[in-house]
């Protein structure tokens, strides 16, 4: 009886360890896949049915949600310095209902920069919460900010290249 309990317990430990390892590898593979897709702006924008501007040296892609306080702050700060982004392609992507996103962006005069997305398209482009700001130079990722970021930090990246 004691031997049987030890064997069952051992098998359960092996199964649990295997399951934990499998899930860890699965999450790691997803992160690598997302990181690889983030590196190529063309791949992301094709997924969002949008084209890269040939005239803009940088593309700033911000994933947001109008209900997020951090997104609200970041979008408001960008609107105050929007003229400093005029030489670059600014894209604001959200997977919330289009009317909500546009209404939110209208408050800051930024609805022209909106690109529609879906949860599926966004989830292939990044993992984690919003806001997330990705900055591309010549279609390649140069900086990725996760969470709220000051406009000055974005502008610094644009000046460095």
Image: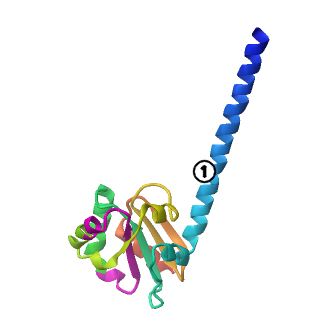
Residue 151 image-quadrant placement: bottom left
Q: Is residue 2 above or below residue 57?
A: above
Q: x and y percent of residue 18 in the render?
A: 70, 37
Q: x and y percent of residue 12 in the render?
A: 69, 26
In depth, the one of 156 and 149 nearer the eye is 149
Task: Provide the residue designation for mark 1.
Answer: 27
Total numbered labels: 1
Callout 1: SS: helix
Residue 16 image-quadrant placement: top right
Residue at image coords 64%, 55%? 29
The magenta stretch spans residue 97: yes
Asked if residue 126 lies left or right of residue 108, the reply is right
Q: x and y percent of residue 104 in the render?
A: 24, 67
Give the magenta part as a residue range.
Answer: 83-102
* Name of the residue lying farthest toward the left: 107
The N terminus, quarter of image:
top right
| Residue 140 makes an appearance in the image | no
Residue at image coords 59%, 57%? 31
Asked if residue 18 lies left or right of residue 142, the reply is right
The structure's colour scheme is rainbow
In depth, the one of 96 and 72 nearer the eye is 96
Q: Is residue 22 above or below residue 37?
A: above
Residue at image coords 54%, 73%? 141
* Name of the residue lying farthest toward the bottom: 55
Q: x and y percent of residue 112 in the render?
A: 30, 80
Q: Is residue 77 above or below residue 88?
A: above
* Name of the residue lying farthest toward the top: 1
| Residue 15 makes an appearance in the image | yes
* Other residues around mark 1 within 10 Å, as few (<14) / some (14–19) / many (≥20): few
The magenta stretch spans residue 81: no
């Amino acid at each position: 009886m004691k031997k049987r309990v030890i064997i069952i317990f051992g098998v359960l430990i092996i199964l649990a360890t295997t399951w934990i390892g499998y899930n860890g590898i699965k999450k790691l593979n997803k992160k690598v896949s997302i990181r690889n897709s983030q590196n190529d702006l063309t791949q992301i924008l094709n997924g969002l049915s949008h084209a890269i501007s040939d005239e803009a040296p940088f593309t700033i892609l911000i994933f947001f949600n109008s209900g997020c306080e951090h997104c609200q702050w970041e979008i408001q700060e960008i609107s105050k310095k929007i003229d400093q982004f005029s030489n670059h392609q600014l894209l604001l992507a959200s997977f919330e209902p289009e009317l909500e996103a546009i209404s939110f962006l209208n408050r800051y005069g930024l609805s022209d920069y909106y690109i529609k997305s879906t949860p599926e398209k966004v989830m292939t482009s990044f993992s984690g919460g919003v806001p997330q700001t990705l900055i591309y130079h010549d279609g390649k990722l140069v900086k990725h900010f996760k969470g709220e970021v000051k406009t000055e930090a974005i502008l610094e990246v644009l000046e460095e290249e």
